[in-house]
Amino acid sequence: MNTQYQQVYVWSQYLRLFHWINVLTITMLLGFGLIIFNAKTLGVSVDGKILLKTVHVLTGYVFAANLLIRVFMGFFGKGYERWHKTLPFAKGFTKELADFKQQPHKKYKGHNPLGKLMVGALLLSMCIQMISGLVIAGTDIYYPPLGQYFAKSIAVDSSKLDSIKPYSKENVDEQDYQKMRELRKPFITAHVYAFYALLCLIPLHIIGVVISERREKTALVSSMISGYKYLPTKDNLDE
Ligand code: HEM
């Protein structure tokens, strides 16, 4: 008997916009990040390094605003924007995972259980990148939201904060500067490790999407563009 299929609207316009802004900004951030990371080997000048960091931080603001709106929508949005349908923490997830192993061709309206685990790992790494990135931007090139606070903490004369510039010692108290450098160390470590995590997770995510597409045959890849999946009208379908 032939299974009847229907087009089902799954990913909202907002969710697709978030996804592709995220792909674009992360690709740019990883690219600029790699150059900054290897600046010495590549022979980048101090001015070049400041320019690269400025572009990296400005792209980071778009990435962070996009991510913060996504976090908000997880609590207040609709359908598959909401956390209980996105993350692997809802009641019954362990059973969902066991069913997934036993029924390889089961079709899912939203994320399959492995998809939820992957999305959780991606979003967690992205949040670590955002928080550590904002602290580093504040302590390195004195950019908002924390730049003014850190500039004040190292200033000899706090009425002349404008004179504090990246890589310059003008109006900078050496001891307070060293204290600030110590404080930022764990944030740099977190930023570097979350960067490595994303470098591994992103290809795995794309491979996972392609494998799920082949197993489930629901037009998963194009659904992140159109919003629609192809699903059977009844049997063998899971949320
Ligand atoms: C830099 C590369 C990428 C990143 C960082 C990324 C990140 C993400 C994130 C965070 C989600 C969860 C969306 C949400 O519910 O908030 C997601 C879902 C999804 N992404 Fe990507 N993505 C990338 C590339 C791609 C590409 C190239 C494709 C298409 C082949 C794709 C297809 C999908 C699909 C179909 C889903 C939902 C299905 C699921 O995994 O359960 N992604 N992605």
Image: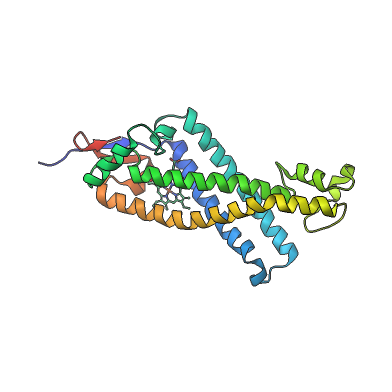
Measured from the top left, where is residue 145 in percent x and y?
Answer: 70, 41
Find residue 152 and report its image quarter.
Answer: top right
In the rendered view, tell whether residue 148 sits above or below residue 40: above
Q: Is residue 141 visible?
A: no
Give the residue displayed 77% in from the left and 41% down from the top: 149
Residue placed farthest to the left in the image?
1
Figure quadrant of the N terminus: top left
Q: Is residue 137 left or right of residue 14?
A: right
Measured from the top left, where is residue 28 in percent x and y?
Answer: 56, 55
Measured from the top left, where is residue 60 in percent x and y?
Answer: 61, 48
Figure quadrant of the C terminus: top left
Q: Is residue 213 left or right of residue 176?
A: left
Q: How many marks?
A: 0
Give the residue displayed 77% in from the left and 51% down from the top: 179
Find residue 236 and report its image quarter.
Answer: top left
Which residue is more in the foreground, 234 or 148? 148
Q: Is residue 162 left or right of residue 104?
A: right
In the rendered view, tell whether residue 82 sits above or below residue 195: above
Q: Is residue 163 visible?
A: yes
Measured from the top left, where is residue 197 in percent x and y?
Answer: 49, 54
Give the residue displayed 22% in from the left and 45% down from the top: 102
In the rendered view, tell whether residue 129 sits above or below residue 33: above
Give the residue displayed 40% in from the left and 52% down from the top: 205
Q: How does the figure colour the protein chain or chains?
A: rainbow
